[in-house]
Amino acid sequence: MQTIALVGPPGSGKSHRALLVSNEKSISVIIDDGLLIKDNHIIAGISSKRQPTKIGAMKTAFFTDDQHAQEVKDKIKEINPSKILILGTSKRMINKICQRLELPEPSEIIYINEIATEEEIQAARRTRQKHGKHVIPAPTVEVKSRFSGLLIEPLPTIFKRRAESKKQKHFMVDQTVVQPTFNYYGSFFIANSAINQIISIAAENIEGVDRIYQIRNKTTPEGINISFLLSVKKGYYNPKVVQRVKEAVKDAIGHMTNLYVLEINVLVKKIAME
């Protein structure tokens, strides 16, 4: 197994350009800020960007927690990749990660200024300092369940290949921008009454629904669980109405609160006679 390091200061654009390096060097596995990513899927780990403090984020990125490190080690053994790209702020950090995950030291070290211009690096650092935004080299659909309730947005990116290749000169990747918990702008709170109102409006806009009541929701770091009772108008086929209600509630909650919906339980309690 070969490890390759991508090194650069915080906020210099390492995560943003990780997929450029992995594409050029045919690397399918990336280790970035506590996560193990394979072929655009997050397959193991805990993101440092989910931690409540910067110190906690650093410890997560270094895999200091034994259970966290073991989970990633086990998954690496399971998939047995030929190459792994490891992102870090220094050679020391890369070596510490390799020690914690029992990986060989890097056979190649790529510095961020080798793959980005000084203007691009400074622009990335200004964005980090001004807005506190971080990039995760994985699509939003992969990230959302792990960052429920945080501010995230998709970042489709077109890269130009640096080396001559028979492949197309440009390629597109899907990445995600997230504002972490430890960032001032990155966390927000929504009252249960507001969530329940969104659920109620979304459900009652579905044809055949009379009203909903006894709404319950429970929010965890992973997402939100929702349950409620439903009154359906006479003449409407219940399973179809329930399915449409679930879809409408899930879409509304995801769009308006950025919470990841884990489960929606609906019980038809009454048939309303018009």
Image (cartoon, grey):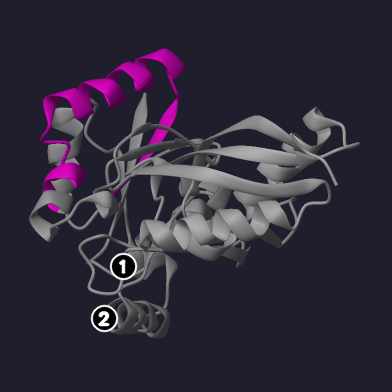
- Determine if the magenta segment contains residue 10: no
- Percent from the top left, x then y, of residue 203? 67, 51
42, above or below 93, in the image: above
Quarter occupied by residue 183: bottom left
Q: Nearer the viewer, residue 268 or 244?
A: 268
Which mark sits nearer the N-terminus, 2 or 1? 2
Q: Label 1 neighbourhood size at 10 Å, few (<14), some (14-19), many (20+)?
A: some
User: Under tag 2, what secondary structure?
Assistant: helix
**Does residue 61 belong to the magenta stretch?**
yes
Looking at the image, the residue that sits furthest to the top is 78
**Residue numbers of the magenta segment:** 58-87
Q: Position of residue 190 (x, y in %)?
A: 37, 63
Residue 186 is marked as: 1
- In the picture, measured across the screen, residue 119 lies left or right of residue 71, that is right
User: Where does label 2 land, which residue?
Assistant: 129
> Which numbered disc covers residue 2?
none
> x%, y% of residue 205?
74, 58
Name the secondary structure under disc 1. Answer: loop
Say which of 33 and 24 sits in front: 33
Residue drawn at 61 percent across, 61 percent down = 161
Left or right, 1 with reference to 240: left
Q: Nearer the viewer, residue 111 or 59?
A: 59
Q: Nearer the viewer, mark 2 or mark 1?
A: 1
